[in-house]
Amino acid sequence: MKKTLLIALFPLTTLASTLDTPNYRIEIESNCVEGEVSCDRMTYHGTSKISGNAISLEGRTWHTTCADGVTPCRFLGYRFENGAVTYRVHEDGLLEVVRHGDEVLVHEQGTWQR
């Protein structure tokens, strides 16, 4: 008797959204299974509209935590790290780039192009 191995496949979806600010164009991609509340496999592709310089970073979704201190609650946006520099892309379209936690390098409001 021949045995058949069945493998359950969960579709990985690559969902992308683009944020346009006065000086940058950022594409955010999710590389997680559809329906996951939080994702540690986000990709940031940012391009300067002035210089044309581009950067790609790996990061995660960003949430408040619920009362238990563990469960993700309200979605805030996305966070990406590049050494001492943190890139935060807020749900409302604000792009913040901060070095060493308090030195603001970029603070620009943008518009999501979904």
Image (cartoon, grey):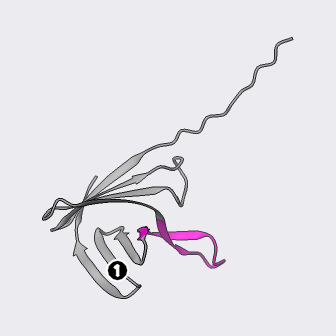
Q: Quadrant of residue 88?
A: bottom left
Residue depicted at x 53% and y 61%: 38
Give the vertical position of 8 relative to 113 (above or below).
Answer: above
Q: Give x and y (percent) for residue 112.
A: 26, 60
Mark 1 neighbour class, 10 Å CA radius: few under 14, some 14 to 19, many 20 or more: some
Residue depicted at x 36% and y 81%: 99
Q: Give x and y (percent) for residue 22.
A: 15, 68
For this view, does 53 lie left or right of residue 59? left
Residue depicted at x 25% and y 78%: 107
Residue depicted at x 22% and y 67%: 110
Query: Which residue is most to the left?
Result: 50
In what quadrant of the picture does the N terminus appear?
top right
Q: Which is nearer the eye, 101 or 88?
A: 101
Question: Which secondary structure class fits the magenta region best?
Answer: strand
Q: Which is nearer the eye, 108 or 37?
A: 108
For this view, does 76 lie left or right of residue 111? right
Q: Is residue 62 magenta?
A: yes
Query: Which residue is most to the bottom?
Result: 102
Give the vertical position of 35 relative to 39 (above or below).
Answer: above
Q: Where is mark 1, residue-wise?
A: 98
Which span is picked out in magenta? Answer: 61-81
Q: Is residue 78 magenta?
A: yes
Q: Total of numbered circles in the picture?
A: 1
Q: Amino acid at mark 1?
A: Val
Q: Which is nearer the eye, 73 or 38?
A: 38
Q: Give x and y (percent) for residue 28.
A: 36, 56
Give the vertical position of 102 relative to 78 (above or below).
Answer: below
